[in-house]
Image (tube, rainbow, N blue to C red):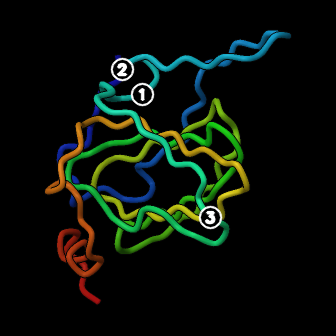
Amino acid sequence: MLINPYKDASQTTVYDCSIIELPRIDNPSGNITVVSNCSQIPFDIKRVYYLYDVPSGEARGGHGHYKLQQLIVAASGSFDIIIDDGNVKRSIHLSRPNVGLFMPPGLWRELNNFSSGSICLVLASEEYLAKDYIRDYPTFLEFKNYRN
């Protein structure tokens, strides 16, 4: 079982994110990837959702979380994730259905450059809770103790 070290989300950085390669079982009739709680990712999965039919040029995300952790996977197609800790920004390109980006809490994210037909699969550590979202960037910077 993986240990989750993220107790203070105000201190997480873009360097706390990690690429996780999920097990892939190849088969001539189609491949399969399996994700199990706490064996490949450092949290129990409490919610699964996916984004699809994102129009060309549109972006998703544009928020942060106080507590929520996520594994984000390009189940089909590709897209970019801009990760921001208030000080440093990183861009990650996802394009393989057995590779995900682990995001601890306390980071701002924006998803863009969705390819046609792409599917963004998100495994989340918590049920939906509106008060866990940081939807305003100045509020996010204040939470991270950064000032403009």
Residue bearing the label numbered 1 = 41
Indicate the secondary structure of the residue bearing disc 2.
loop
The residue tagged with tag 1: helix, strand or loop? loop
Mark with earlier residue (3, 1): 1
Mark nearer the N terminus (2 vs 3):
2
Identify the residue shown where x is 23% and y is 37%: 127
Q: Position of residue 67 (x, y in %)?
A: 21, 47
Q: Viewer-nearest of labels 3 and 1?
A: 3
Q: Callout 3: few (<14), some (14-19), or many (20+) C-alpha neighbours within 10 Å?
A: few
Label 1 is placed on what type of residue? Answer: Ile
Q: Is residue 28 left or right of residue 106?
A: right
Q: What residue type is disc 2 on?
A: Cys
Residue receiving disc 3: 55
From this view, report whether residue 148 is shown above or below residue 117: below
Residue marked by disc 2: 38
Task: Please identify the quadrant where the N terminus is shown.
Answer: top left
Residue at 79%, 9% (x, y): give it: 27
> What type is the residue that disc 3 sits on?
Pro
Q: Residue most toward the right?
A: 28
Q: Nearest the camera: 31 or 148?
A: 31
